[in-house]
Amino acid sequence: MTNTTRVNETEILQKNEIMMAKNTHLSSIFTEKIIQMSNVWTSYDSKNFALEEINLSIDRGTNYAIVGESGSGKSTLLKLMNGMMHFSKGTIKIDYVVPNMNDKKFKKMMHTIGYIPQNLGLIKNITVLENTLIGALPRLSKIQSLFKRFPEHEIQEAKRILKLVVLSGKEDRKVYTLSGGEKRRVAIARALMQKPTILLADEIVSELDHVTAHEIMDLIADAQKQMNLTAIMVHHDMKLALEYANRVAVIKKGRKILEIGVEGETIVDFQTGDVSTEEIMEMYADDSKK
Ligand SMILES: Nc1ncnc2c1ncn2[C@@H]1O[C@H](COP(=O)(O)OP(=O)(O)O)[C@@H](O)[C@H]1O
Ligand SMILES: [Mg+2]
């Protein structure tokens, strides 16, 4: 971690302390946890729970990964974090706010959550620049937004971000002409254009080859440091998750069964304390090849 990052973090922490002091109803408790879930249950059909008894807390500015077999509830967990999914039981706080699409405060906050769905959600027959500018839509006036009239400073900002994700020179290319890696860069650019505090990415590198997957992950790690982002990423590959994340939550059949992270040369188990490194890697040895 660089000195600059530390300074930014301190500044942000101080700002939050001031904010908390002003908001008396939020009490004087200060926490650096940006996401907190306590005993959260959710279901799609009111019969079966897609997630059960989820407890997790994510530190501001960190990289958190969610790993698990197909159908285990990873995408549902991300959707809970951006308010796209209701929860039936428990409590969720996203930067002190309960996610609820009908709540004005949360709606405002939602714009600062950059969400990249598994299918990326790009508009294929418009350009790279136009897709990136979509991230700025919430900042535009109703009229500007309706006619997609972007002010010059937003266009310049989009170009700056496209440079950051190494897409300079490709601004005018239609998205359908891009490679898989390039499409992911556009999705990241659009999310960064939102000036997010939280970045949620659902299996963004799953279909990529090893080298491209690392390029994309390095890019996110760089953006994260520069912008003091909290990144929460769903992965299929446990090794990759452990390589980049401070913490990895393992989800199985809707339950969080493990929370691990690499410290030095060893894998530290934060949830159960009795699973060896070998057992963890064995659990996912076959999965990572799928
Ligand atoms: N829209 C939906 N309607 C009903 N059930 C769903 C829906 N989306 C997901 N599920 C179910 O919820 C569970 C978790 O799904 P999901 O979060 O997509 O898993 P993952 O992302 O780990 O593959 C699965 O049993 C899946 O079938
Ligand atoms: Mg999924």
Image: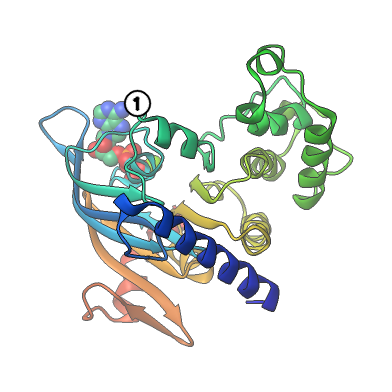
Residue closest to the eye, 267 or 14: 14
Residue occupying image coordinates x 75% and y 50%: 165
Where is residue 258 drawn, in percent x and y? 27, 67
Q: Quadrant of residue 114?
A: top right
Report x, y in % for residue 273: 23, 80
The x and y percentages for residue 269 are 30, 77
Closest to the observer: 75 or 156? 156
Q: Residue at x 64, y 33 (%)?
A: 135
- In this picture, residue 173 sits left or right of residue 278: right
Residue 148's place in the image compared with 34, above or below, is: above
The answer to whether 13 appears left or right of 285 in the picture is: right
> Which quarter of the image is occupied by the N terminus?
bottom right
Determine which residue is flagged by label 1.
102
Residue 218 quadrant: bottom right
Q: Residue at x 74, y 35 (%)?
A: 178
Percent across and percent down for residue 137 are 64, 27
- Apparent side of residue 107 relative to residue 218 in the rendered image (left or right): left
Number of residues whose C-alpha sits closer than 10 Å to that of mark 1, classed few (under 14), some (14–19) or many (20 or more): few
Element under label 1? loop
Q: Quadrant of ligand 2?
A: top left
Q: Amino acid at mark 1?
A: Asn
- Spot the residue most to the bottom: 265
- Is 72 rendered above or below residue 217? above
